[in-house]
Image (cartoon, helix red, strand yellow):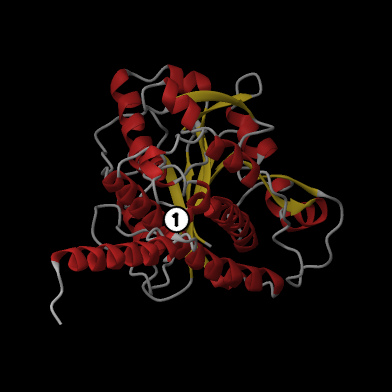
Amino acid sequence: MTITPTNKGMSRSHDSRAMKGRERNAPCWCGSGKKYKKCHLGRDAQPKENPWAAVDVNRKAFSQKKCWARDVGLGDCEGGVIKAHTVSRGPNLAKIAENGHVLQYGASIPDMNKNGGKLSVKRIGIKDASVFHGFCSKHDREIFSCIENEVFTGRPDQCLAVAYRTMSRELYGKDAGSHLRETLRGADKGMQPFEQFMLQKMLDEIDTGNEAARRDLKATHDALTAALVAARTDTLSSLIFEFAAPIPFMFAGAWSPFTDLHGAELQKGYVDELLEQVFVSSFAGESSAMICISWRNIDGAPGKVIADQLEELADETRASACLQFVMKHVENVFFNPDWFGALGEKQKERLDHLAADGIDPMGSVPSMPVRLDVDFRLPRSIRSFHA
């Protein structure tokens, strides 16, 4: 049968409508689980969302209360979940505070918007510094009494307690950040299709990285929890450095190191690879200070490589190297205001660069190298010992 051009045109139009109908009802390409017509169809013409909505959601996520020691073999919870300090307030933060305040680099969206995308250094009261809603009052009191109510001497039980609290804070942060993928899914409204695609791709990569990091931290947190329950302090190894005078900064953090102090690869970070972490923390004394580097006691632990490299440095450069290294990787770093204010432009610029290098939404490895020629006027170390 001969088909006339008119019939051809009608047939194509019918096929086109059917195809578009199938596309409209197909799952959206962004992975939301919604139909395309209910998600990204016509998104370029939709009004932009409130850019601060994600900030409010994020603030609420980081205010959720959960005791990480609940139902793990450390006894029942008692009392409400409190603000737990990752860096101890009385023993450490108070020692570097000025009128009850310390300084910290901030990376909040409102502040960065005001400062043209740059980080700012803000005063924060020591009651609010380095806190998270991570333990009930009983568990916070019982588990961490050895570091809150006793002088830190580098005992194995103290090293385990501070590593457990630090890892709990890191895992809390990953859980709190898990909402970002869904919260920001509509952030591409009003954008052109290519811009939509690139934003959704970036959000997927951030989410993938966050979930991989959460899996790594959860595995280590489970191991530290089991060690705490069984009082197996040999689960961790630690190297402690003591300094001849107080240091003007305090910190506590953990991360999965991809490279060592000199940039050589330690872990590849494949999606199916469980990464090991290094735990770092500082402690203030009356006339001295200590920095503790800990790692899980396994063969080839990346933390041991880093600790050995720090131990090989000259005594007068070790505090500077530790400061620069944690500035790249740790959020909870606090400064004595007088010391920070007295720094020269070169020193402040160095800290600015290190802090900015460690904040990357794509989760890449900070690349800023440690420079031992920058003098931060820090005390020399006088001894090191293993725990």
Q: Nearer the viewer, residue 152 or 16?
A: 16
Q: Is residue 19 left or right of residue 110?
A: left
The amino acid type of the residue labelled 1 equals Lys
Q: Quadrant of residue 53?
A: top right
Residue named by callout 1: 37
SS for callout 1: helix
Above or below, comparing residue 15 to residue 81 in the picture = below
Q: Nearer the viewer, residue 4 or 46?
A: 4
For residue 310, say whether it is visible: no
Question: Which residue is the extreme one toward the bottom?
Answer: 1
**Residue 145 x %, y %:** 74, 52
| Residue at (47% x, 22% y) in the render | 339
Q: Residue at x 66, y 23 (%)?
A: 100
Residue 343 in view of the camera? yes
Residue 135 spot, x, y in % from top left: 73, 53
Residue 198 at x, y = what percent? 30, 49
Q: Quadrant of the N terminus?
A: bottom left
Quarter of the view holding residue 223 = bottom right
In percent of the image, x 40 and y 69: which residue is there?
A: 301
Q: Is residue 329 above or below residue 354?
A: below
Image spot of residue 57 (x, y percent): 60, 42
109 lies left or right of 356: right
The answer to whether residue 49 is left or right of residue 83 is: left
